[in-house]
Amino acid sequence: MPLLDESSLPRDCPPTVPVVIIGNGPSGICLSYLLSGYTPYLDPAAVHPNPILYHKLQEAKHLPITEQNLEYLSEGLEGRSENPVAVLFDTLLHPNADLGFEFPPVLQWRLEKQHHIPHLVLGKATPGGAWHAMEGSMLTISLGIWMELPGVNYRDITPGKRRSMTKDRATPEEISSYYKNYVKLMGLQKNFADNAYVTSVQKLHRGLDSNLGKETGIENGTKTGQRNGTENGFDYCNQKATENGHSGSENGFSNGFKSGTENGGGRGKAGEEENRRKRSIDGMRENGIPQGLSQGLWEVRGYQQLQGDAHVPFCVFAENVVLATGASDSPARLGVEGEDLPYVFHNVRDLGVAVNRHGKLGPASDPVLVVGAGLSAADAVLCACNHSISVLHVFRKRADDPSLIFKQLPKTLYPEYHRVYHMMCSQTCSASPIANCGASQAVPSASSVLFPDYTSFPEHCVLSFQPDMRCLLRGSSGILRAFKVSMVLVLIGTYPNLFFLKEQGQYLGLDPSRPISCRQNPVDINPYTFECSAEPGLFAMGPLVGDNFVRFIKGGALGIASCLLKRLKQIKKKGKLIADEGGCGRVGRGDGRGSGGFV
């Protein structure tokens, strides 16, 4: 994605918000719900089936869950997430779900304005994230009710759609529609900026940031009468700046930046750009944004795509940034010869496009090669088989490997995936060698030993893709096989794209020497606050911390909201709260979304 006018800044002070959430999928939506003042309490009429947890909840039943000790409540709980708060929130919303029960939640939600924290959610499309891009005919792995967010029952929005044994699963189309409607029903639209692409996230440190200090000669420390309230990770603007800040648009986002761009944005001369930058910094100094930053603000840059090809650059200062980007931005690659050839793809959607394009792919075509043994690969196999297209299925593991995802799925609920798994085990390539030769020698086609509809190649890897649409495979015994195919789908996982962070976010991982991966190397966080261990004020949730199911990403929202609300409460006790009404910083929000804020 090109970075258009990334360095442009509005004339006035860029807005400052307590929290910027990058990503508007279910992770970001759920966190927005909690930061908007929706507060979870123990339902007085509910009894949790876990007596130990229920006893703990009774001890402080007058307090919201967000104000309680999450570590204490999570202790001893077990579930299908490595994050204890994720397991806690899941059992409060879906008690004993893994045992097959469908008990009602034990939480009661109350809208309490004193628990509202102003925030901004930046997403590349409409709320729902990657769910809008998924194949609409497939069924979700999780049950529909496990995909729902607090406060709105999934079945109330999508009634009357049942599918025999898979009756409680949903299509991505239904889920994406649910998330989009959820934002409207909960009144969260004012927090969301759609079609917003983040291109840079940097932390500004006191006395170290050249943009705020060296270029303008601003001294470290604060102006007389200005508060330096950065304790617990929060900074504040003065009351005058807040009272005068009402120039935002309907969503508090695009118009503020648009006017800044029209008044001097774009790729002007270097001197003009320098003047704009200095004016912006002078505005920060004059309008109350703290200069003596003890922990530093986050500078979030990017652009918002408007109707047509218009791009409006923006710059936002945030006291806290939440990474809720998911992990499906960049497909994992094999790294073999020919992987960039035009018949090699890395997304299952491309198979649907080829099937639907008349004459492109059909029963008379050469086989489709699918690489991978996960659910995306299984979806590709199902799509091809449903259109009578022959499949060659290559994967590194044994067909009976216990770690395969199919082993974890009940047959009655996931019959289509067990159909694929049965073929993986029973329709394997003949053990007789097709060719046992060096890689440089020609290898004959092996169509005569293939099953007509599907053939699996356990413990095989791809050596290369050739321009003549032949693929060279090698088995565990060293046997080489070559096949002519019509299309290749490499579906071996995805990685998050954190290019907007320094080192592409790699320094945040459990192993800083390796790229971030939701399975092999998730972001290293405090398990109860979800704050990054390597970077105070930066939080991560969802797949970035290993939670790939919507059931458990909601726990990240609980942990982050609880952390921020507790810090806010501490600040209030110390008398540090200045801004009680109005917008965030110099560029406010006329719709009142900043009321009760602390910036």
Image (spheres, grey):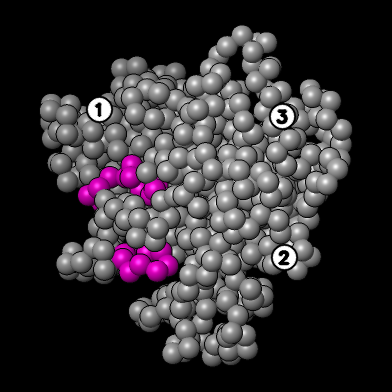
Disc 1 vs disc 2: which is toward the camera?
A: 2
Is residue 599 positioned above or below 42 on the image? Answer: above
Q: Which residues are magenta?
A: 127-154
Residue pictured at 26% horizontal, 55% vertical:
174
Which is more N-terminal, label 1 or label 3?
Answer: 3
Residue position for label 1: 486
Q: Is residue 495 among the parts visible in the rendering? A: no
Q: Are marks 3 and 1 in contact (CB under 8 Å)?
A: no
Q: Which residue is mark 3?
A: 281
Does residue 599 appear left or right of residue 372 in this picture? right
Q: Which mark sits nearer the N-terminus, 3 or 2?
A: 3
- Residue 486 drawn at (x, y percent): 25, 27
Count neighbours of disc 3 (C-alpha within 10 A) and say few if under 14, some if 14 to 19, many if 20 or more. many
Image position, residue 597 (x, y; %): 61, 56
Secondary structure of the residue carrying numbered label 1: loop
Image height of 364 relative to 155, above or below: above
Q: Position of residue 80 (x, y in %)?
A: 50, 67
**What is the three-letter code of the residue carrying label 3?**
Ile
Residue that label 2 marks: 572
Q: Judge left or right: residue 345 versus residue 521.
A: left
- Mark 3, secondary structure of its residue: helix
Front: mark 3 or 1 = 3
Q: Seen in the image, is 291 located left or right of residue 599?
A: right
Residue 542 can be seen in this image = yes
For label 1, count other residues whose C-alpha is less than 10 Å away and answer few (under 14), some (14-19) or many (20+).
some
Q: Secondary structure at mark 2?
A: helix
